[in-house]
Image (tube, rainbow, N blue to C red):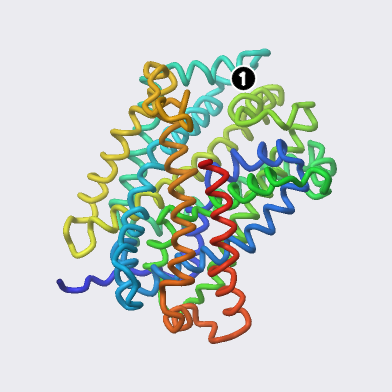
Amino acid sequence: MQKVKHEQWASGFTFLLAAVGSAVGLGNIWRFPYVVAENGGGAFVLIYLAIVIVFGIPLLMSELMIGRGTQKPPVAAIQQMAHQSKASKLWNMLGWSYVIVPLGVLTFYSVVAGWTLDYAIAIGIGSLNNLQEGDSAKIFQELQDSPLKLIFWMTLSAVITIGIVARGLKSGLEKTVTILMPALFVILVLLMLYASITGEFIKSVAFMFDPDFSKITPELVLMAAGQAFFSLSLGAGSMMVYGSYLNRDISIPKMAVGVAFSDTLVALLSGFAIFPIVFAYGVEPTSGPGLVFVTLPIVFSDMGWIGQLFGFLFFLLLAFAAITSTISLLEPMVAQLSEGEKFSRARAAIYAGAAFWFVGIFVALSNNVLKDVHPLDFLPLFEGMNIEAVINFLAANVFMVLNGLLVSIFAGWAIKRSITLEELGMGDSMLFKIWFMLVRYVVPIGVAFIFYDVVL
């Protein structure tokens, strides 16, 4: 078969925007603030930052190295690396996991992306103005109870995602991220500045950066590790396939550090955009997942027209973050299907998109008409879980972690050291030796503990 050369990113900066868009998602803006609040504030942030450096950057470098070194999508990339290193053909299964797991993540991620679109429109047209106590929770529950609304908004997010990916690297992904990512950062900075002026900014800084070391427990460390792992989009195929479009004269270590830094910055800025307002209005920061979709709409409603404006910007920000992540999750399967011109990119995007959309319907219905369906109730681990919870747990909490564990072993033990030396471009330097030690020993052992905690 004739080798098909992938398109390449226009520049390292364009790749950085795309990779940060993949990493930056609802996990940073929706999940990070309430997880920080529930896990000791500054103590959690400190552990989180350490794990990003020790776990996140080495794994990012490994995934980018495999993609860029082969210029192929995950299945062919793993296969080629294994062949060149005379490693077992069983590693090919890891490549397939890297294209199938993202579709599983998409089935529930697209549903939540639909929530953000619904809320952005609702607050923009004034439907969430003048909320009374209990109204916000009722509105959110009504959305969950409406099969038609959930399917409509999920379908809209799916159509947007499929349409962007179908247009290809230059016309689709590049154009989208060069517009959405700067817009995302501008909106986030505006929200942070507004919150710092009108809210309890100093209290928020102390909350996030004044650690209480007595709160550091094994559970907190594991929670921080899980947040860092999923926030950086590791084990989901996105970074590997984005790396396959990376020009060979661009430094992988620099790109990995840039992605990790930018992703962490967005998470911290999100905290500074949310906590000052939360503290100023006397809202409990440990409100959990409802902090964004239930609590904050009440706060924005109390702020009058300025609250409507910034509430719209906030949920538009969430929608942008969701879309930049969904396109990166669809890309591995589309790249795989269109590899070797098996299908056109447009047809591959439609086929892969139809697959996750179809399963996404059952996810959207799992909190209403299918709420009593517990597909794996016969297994103790999944007892009481509905369809959405099972897919979420398996895709995000099991297989993404397992992918990260296996790719660290693959990069550290299966790939020849000479290949990693050449692809990373650091020479046999101290930095390379540190990466090699981390990816060979520290990351596998650490991720294995996370996997053990999640599954057992």
Point out the residue furthest to the bottom here. 428
Q: Where the N terminus falls, by quadrant?
A: bottom left
Circle 1 is placed at which residue position?
A: 129
Q: As displayed, is residue 232 above or below residue 272?
A: below
Q: Viewed as shown, does residue 362 lie left or right of 278?
A: left
Q: As displayed, is residue 402 above or below residue 146?
A: below
Q: Viewed as shown, does residue 340 lie left or right of 185?
A: left
Q: As displayed, is residue 365 above or below residue 35?
A: above
* Residue shown at the point (60%, 52%) measured from the top left: 228
Q: Which quarter of the figure has residue 345?
A: bottom left
Looking at the image, how many numbered discs can be counted on the residues? 1
Q: Secondary structure at mark 1?
A: loop
* Residue shown at the point (51%, 64%) measured from the top left: 60
* Residue shown at the point (41%, 74%) measured from the top left: 415
Q: Position of residue 159 (x, y in %)?
A: 32, 39
Q: Say which of 281 and 328 sits in front.
A: 328
Q: Position of residue 44 (x, y in %)?
A: 72, 47
Q: Say which of 183 and 227 sits in front.
A: 227
- Going by the numbered disc 1, the residue's amino acid type is Asn
Q: Viewed as shown, does residue 234 lie left or right of 271?
A: left
Q: Say which of 420 and 376 sits in front.
A: 376
Is disc 1 surrounded by few (<14), some (14 to 19) or many (20+) residues within 10 Å? many
Q: Position of residue 375 (x, y in %)?
A: 36, 26
Q: Viewed as shown, does residue 135 lie left or right of 91?
A: right
Q: Position of residue 448 (x, y in %)?
A: 54, 54
